[in-house]
Image (cartoon, helix red, strand yellow):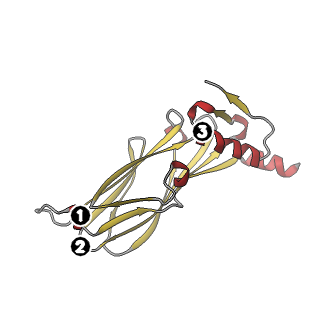
């Protein structure tokens, strides 16, 4: 049908949320320190465009200097100082499809802070947090003409790609066993 042809021409959008990575409740950092690496499964050959969207919430009970960084691969793509008041914000960054390595996009989230410059702080009473909310995701625009499901890249990626193929009514799926 004409609609199916338009869908194929536009490509397939795949949203890989934190829940698919095993973080149904999102992520939380506290104690003025934390780091987490996330590995989003992406078929490199089919990825045309990617956008990382992180929904965040932050607060500190005490005056402090806090910051966060987002890295893709080993490159910092976003850094921001965090205020002490309750704040919610979204980070939206276009990601180069060349960032896919071995079937994954590696995203590192870093959180750090200090209450004073000249004293040690017991991190258990820092009274701060940075939450990465469950709606955070990597959205990938896939080229249906190149979509190949790599079973060796993991069950989540395989099932996600099959869902994309089914929902877009694509005519051919090639499954490669490695």
- Marker disc for residue 63: 2
- Please say if the residues under marks 2 and 1 sit with CB atoms less than 8 Å apart: no
* Residue that carries the numbered disc 1 in the rendered image: 124
Q: Quadrant of residue 88?
A: bottom left
Quick check: 127 above or below 109? below
Image position, residue 175 (x, y; %): 70, 30
Q: Residue at x 66, y 50 (%)?
A: 13
Determine whether the residue tagged by mark 2 lies in a helix, strand or loop: loop
The label nearer to you, 2 versus 1, is 1
Q: Nearer the viewer, residue 75 or 112?
A: 112
Farthest residue in the left direction? 118
Image position of 81 (left or right of 139): left
What residue is disc 3 on? 155
Disc 1 is placed on an element classified as helix
Locate the C terminus and report the quarter of the image it occupies: top right
> Vertical placement of 52 versus 121: above or below?
above
Residue situated in front as seen by the camera: 4 or 129: 129
Residue toward you, 23 or 133: 23
Q: Between marks 2 and 1, how big is the CA–CA gap?
A: 16 Å
Q: Earlier in the sequence, mark 2 or mark 1?
A: 2
């Amino acid at each position: 049908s004409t609609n199916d042809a338009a869908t194929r021409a536009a490509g397939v959008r795949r949203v890989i949320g934190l829940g698919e990575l095993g973080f149904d409740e999102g992520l939380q950092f506290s104690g003025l320190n934390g780091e987490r690496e996330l590995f989003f499964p992406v078929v490199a050959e089919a990825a045309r465009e990617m956008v990382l969207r992180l929904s965040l919430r932050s607060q500190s009970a005490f005056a402090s200097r806090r910051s966060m960084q987002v890295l893709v691969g080993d490159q910092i793509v976003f850094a921001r100082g965090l205020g002490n008041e309750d704040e919610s914000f979204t980070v939206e960054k276009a990601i180069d499809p060349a960032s896919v390595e071995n079937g994954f996009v590696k995203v590192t989230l870093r959180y750090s802070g200090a209450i004073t410059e000249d004293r040690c702080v017991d991190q258990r009473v820092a009274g701060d947090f940075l939450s990465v909310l469950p709606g955070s995701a990597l959205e990938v625009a896939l080229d249906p003409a190149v979509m190949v499901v790599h079973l060796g890249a993991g069950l989540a990626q395989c099932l996600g790609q099959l869902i994309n193929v089914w929902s877009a009514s694509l005519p051919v799926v090639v499954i490669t066993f490695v």
